[in-house]
Amino acid sequence: MQRTLLLAKIHNCTLTAANLHYVGSISIDQTLLAAAGILPYEQVQVVNVTNGERLITYAIAAPANSGAIELNGAAARLGIPGDRLIIMTYGQFTPEELKTYCPTVVLVTERNRLLEVRRYDDLLAQV
């Protein structure tokens, strides 16, 4: 049996743009993607803390160190610049993989600059 758990998240980032007429997805600063271990075109869940909206889309890389977090296409209707977001990916793990499993959490400044990368090692004790 496999279980689905949080793999990585970018916590409390700021939406910088909403581009309705752009081909869908969410653009994320490449530096933040790399820090979280999120791949371009990987499925992500986006939670808008400001308005409660949730959506699933895929990540595309914005220029490194740009601070860009941009909702594109239809998703652009679910947020406005300045909204606070949490961007998450999930993974499926076997019981054996859970023995060494640890999610990655990326914390950012208000301008989406990398502040800290955390590993939630305490989850291993619960498995």
Image (cartoon, rainbow, N blue to C red):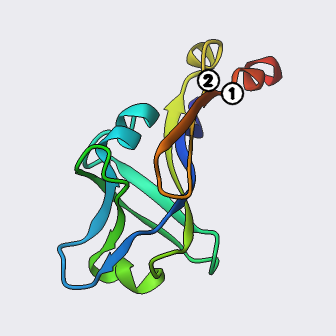
* Residue 44 on image: x %, y %: 42, 54
How many neighbours does mark 2 have within 10 angstroms: few (below 14), some (14-19), or many (20 or more)? some
Residue 66 horizontal side relative to residue 48, left or right: left
**What type is the residue that disc 2 sits on?**
Cys
Quarter of image, res 74: bottom left
Whether residue 11 is visible:
yes
* Residue 97 on image: x %, y %: 56, 16
Which quadrant of the rendered structure holds the N terminus?
top right
Whether residue 104 is visible:
no
Quarter of image, res 110: bottom right
**What type is the residue that disc 1 sits on?**
Tyr
Residue 69 horizontal side relative to residue 118, left or right: left
How many neighbours does mark 1 have within 10 angstroms: few (below 14), some (14-19), or many (20 or more)? few
Give the residue number, with chain letter if any, for mark 1: 120
* Residue 43 on image: x %, y %: 37, 52
Labels 2 & 1 near each other (Cβ < 8 A): yes
Name the N-terminal-most of marks 2 and 1: 2
* Residue 105 on image: x %, y %: 59, 37
In front of the other: 105 or 68: 68
Give the residue number, with chain letter if any, for mark 2: 102
Rendered residue at 58%/33% (across/down): 116
Residue 14 drawn above or below residue 102? below
In front of the other: 69 or 127: 69
Mark-to-mark CA distance, 2 and 1: 6 Å
Residue 122 drawn above or below residue 31? above
Q: What kind of element bears circle 1?
A: loop
Q: Residue 3: give its label.
A: none
